Image (spheres, grey):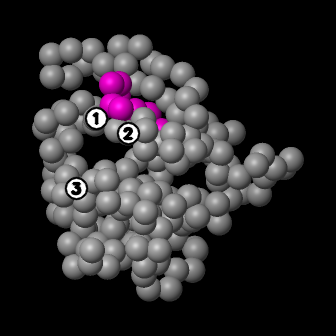
């Protein structure tokens, strides 16, 4: 298998990221977006997002084959140590270890930043995503029933929780992603692949 590189995303990755994301939007209820986002708007979204939270891509032979990111969990101040995670893998790269490599790198960065908990919302049913998240260490915490309507039916959304670090007595303020010192590529993703 060719070498896999993990790195921080840039706005220039919007087209490649959207090529992975589009089938999830068009053909499934995995994403509750109902239209594929505009490339220019998505590039701006990535740029704005990268100040606070990591957004990573996996590349193989200069092609983006997957991405993961953390985002705001809730807006009120006491939630600031919690994030939500998302991960999307190109069809040809699924079950290759790319997802595990991306999540391992993502949570290493979140740990360095000082985040404590991560939540993942998963449209049900989705046994592949459930299996992936639970194998990674996520635990179920609840279900929002009939939370979204797409493709002619209602879908439940299950919520899973991952303990990034043990709960500190008094947490330090989370560090913005933009101030972390990353030198070049994050890692050779093959180190984290099964």
Let me know if residue 74 appears in the view. Answer: no
| Residue hosting label 3 | 90
What residue is at 35 percent from the left and 14 percent from the top?
A: 146
Measured as percent of width and height from the top left, residue 182 is found at: 52, 80
Measured as percent of width and height from the top left, residue 185 is found at: 42, 81
Q: Is residue 83 above or below residue 161?
A: below
Foreground label between 1 and 2: 2
Q: In this view of the protein, which residue sits in the foreground, 133 or 180?
A: 133
Callout 3: 10 Å neighbours few (<14), some, many (20+)? Answer: some
Q: Is residue 103 above or below residue 34?
A: below
Considering only order in the chain, which callout, 1 or 3, is on the residue closer to the N terminus?
Answer: 1
In the image, which residues are magenta?
A: 120-127
Q: Quadrant of the N terminus?
A: bottom left
| Residue hosting label 2 | 129
Secondary structure mostly seen in magenta is strand
Q: CA distance from mark 2 to mark 3?
A: 14 Å
Considering only order in the chain, which callout, 3 or 2, is on the residue closer to the N terminus?
Answer: 3
166 is within the stretch colored magenta: no
What residue is at 52 percent from the left and 48 percent from the top?
A: 136
Considering only order in the chain, which callout, 2 or 1, is on the residue closer to the N terminus?
Answer: 1
Q: CA distance from mark 3 to mark 1?
A: 14 Å
Are the residues at dot 1 and dot 2 in contact (C-beta closer than 8 Å)?
A: yes
Q: Secondary structure at mark 1?
A: loop
Judge from the rendering whether residue 179 lies leftward or rightward of residue 3; answer left or right: right
| Residue hosting label 1 | 30
Measured as percent of width and height from the top left, residue 160 is found at: 53, 34
123 is within the stretch colored magenta: yes
What residue is at 21 percent from the left and 41 percent from the top?
A: 24
């Amino acid at each position: 298998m060719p070498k896999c590189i993990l790195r921080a995303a840039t706005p220039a990755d919007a087209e490649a990221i959207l090529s992975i994301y589009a089938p999830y939007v068009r053909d499934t209820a995995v994403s509750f977006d109902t239209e594929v986002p505009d490339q220019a708007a998505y590039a701006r979204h990535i740029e704005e997002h990268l100040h606070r939270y990591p957004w990573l891509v996996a590349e193989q032979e200069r092609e983006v084959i997957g991405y993961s990111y953390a985002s705001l969990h809730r807006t009120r101040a006491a939630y600031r140590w919690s994030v939500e995670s998302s991960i999307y893998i190109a069809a040809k790269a699924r079950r290759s270890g790319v997802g595990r490599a991306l999540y391992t790198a993502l949570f290493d960065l979140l740990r360095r930043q000082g985040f404590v908990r991560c939540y993942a919302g998963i449209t049900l049913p989705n046994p592949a995503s459930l299996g992936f998240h639970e194998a990674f260490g996520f635990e179920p915490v609840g279900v929002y029933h009939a939370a979204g309507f797409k493709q002619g039916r209602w879908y439940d959304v299950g919520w899973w929780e991952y303990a990034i670090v043990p709960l500190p007595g008094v947490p330090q303020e989370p560090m913005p992603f933009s101030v972390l010192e990353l030198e070049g590529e994050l890692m050779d993703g093959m180190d984290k692949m099964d």
